[in-house]
């Protein structure tokens, strides 16, 4: 199965459609799939729901898709440092689903593991819990959170082999692996692509079984 594609546009060919749910990797400004985001901008796919730890900044990362008004809803933990995001949200032009950071990561990981929901104490008694099922375990309240099953995952790795086994660097590892796992299709951009066997199996952060298409 050929996984390596020539460029971002080719790697995303046939995968994009209006109204889709995209899980995007990145933590702050680290590990953002810049080339894939630009390809989505160029394609013009709209009414997107994007699950990502943050929404980029003005002119960079997911901020580019906000500027072109292609994102309808963000599922995020942190949305600061983005003036256009703030403007759209306060004007009622953008939907926002806030998630505690660990909850968002676990929702992605759960989706990748085929788990439709899980209970967590995080958010109990706050606005996060509004409208969610509450269950008591050992005398403590927990709220039900749903796993994220994305139509597409776009992520960025430091190194990967041609089968998709990937290594991420430092904070880029926080959200890229769970984002990759929860996509029905995962497209990954990589700084360096090597041949199978060149990466130490004990150092792999994401098995290639989760990755369908790769670009450098």
Image: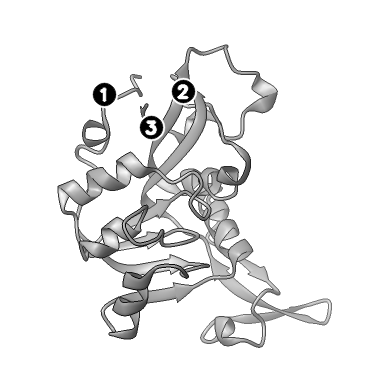
Say what secondary structure mark 1 lies in: loop
- Number of the front mark, 2 or 1: 2
Say what secondary structure mark 3 lies in: loop
Up the image or down, 112 lies above or below 123; here it is: above
Residue at the spot 20% in from the left edge and 52% down from the top edge: 17
**x, y percent for residue 3:** 35, 24
**x, y percent for residue 124:** 67, 82
Say which mark, if any, is on residue 212.
3
Residue at the spot 16% in from the left edge and 53% down from the top edge: 44
Say which mark, if any, is on residue 46.
none
Up the image or down, 124 lies above or below 31; here it is: below
* Circle 2 residue: 192
Residue at the spot 49% in from the left edge and 43% down from the top edge: 31
Say what secondary structure mark 2 lies in: strand
* Circle 1 residue: 6
Dot 3 or dot 2: first in sequence order is: 2
Q: Quadrant of residue 143?
A: bottom right
Which of the pair 51/36 is nearer the observer? 36
Question: Could you tell me which quadrant the N terminus lies in?
Answer: top left
**x, y percent for residue 152:** 35, 48
Label 2, residues with CA under 10 Å away: few <14, some 14-19, many ≥20: few
Which of the pair 209/128 is nearer the observer? 128
């Amino acid at each position: 199965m050929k996984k390596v594609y020539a460029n971002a546009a080719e790697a995303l060919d046939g995968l994009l459609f209006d109204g889709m749910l995209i899980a995007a990797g990145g933590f702050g400004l680290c590990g953002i799939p810049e080339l894939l985001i630009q390809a989505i901008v160029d394609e013009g796919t709209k009414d997107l729901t994007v699950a990502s730890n943050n929404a980029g900044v003005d002119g960079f990362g997911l901020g580019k898709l906000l500027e072109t008004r292609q994102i309808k809803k963000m599922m995020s933990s942190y949305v600061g440092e983005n003036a256009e995001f703030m403007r759209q949200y306060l004007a009622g032009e953008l939907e926002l689903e806030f998630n505690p950071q660990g909850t968002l990561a676990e929702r992605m990981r759960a989706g990748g593991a085929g788990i439709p929901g899980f209970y967590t104490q995080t958010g109990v008694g706050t606005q996060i819990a509004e409208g969610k099922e509450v269950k008591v375990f050992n005398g403590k309240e927990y709220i039900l959170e749903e796993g994220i099953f994305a139509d597409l995952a776009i992520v960025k790795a430091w190194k990967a082999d041609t089968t998709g086994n990937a290594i991420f660097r430092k904070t880029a590892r926080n959200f890229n692996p769970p984002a990759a796992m929860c996509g029905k299709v995962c497209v990954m951009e990589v700084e360096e692509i090597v041949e199978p066997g060149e990466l130490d199996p004990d150092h792999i952060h994401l098995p290639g079984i989760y990755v369908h298409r790769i670009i450098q």
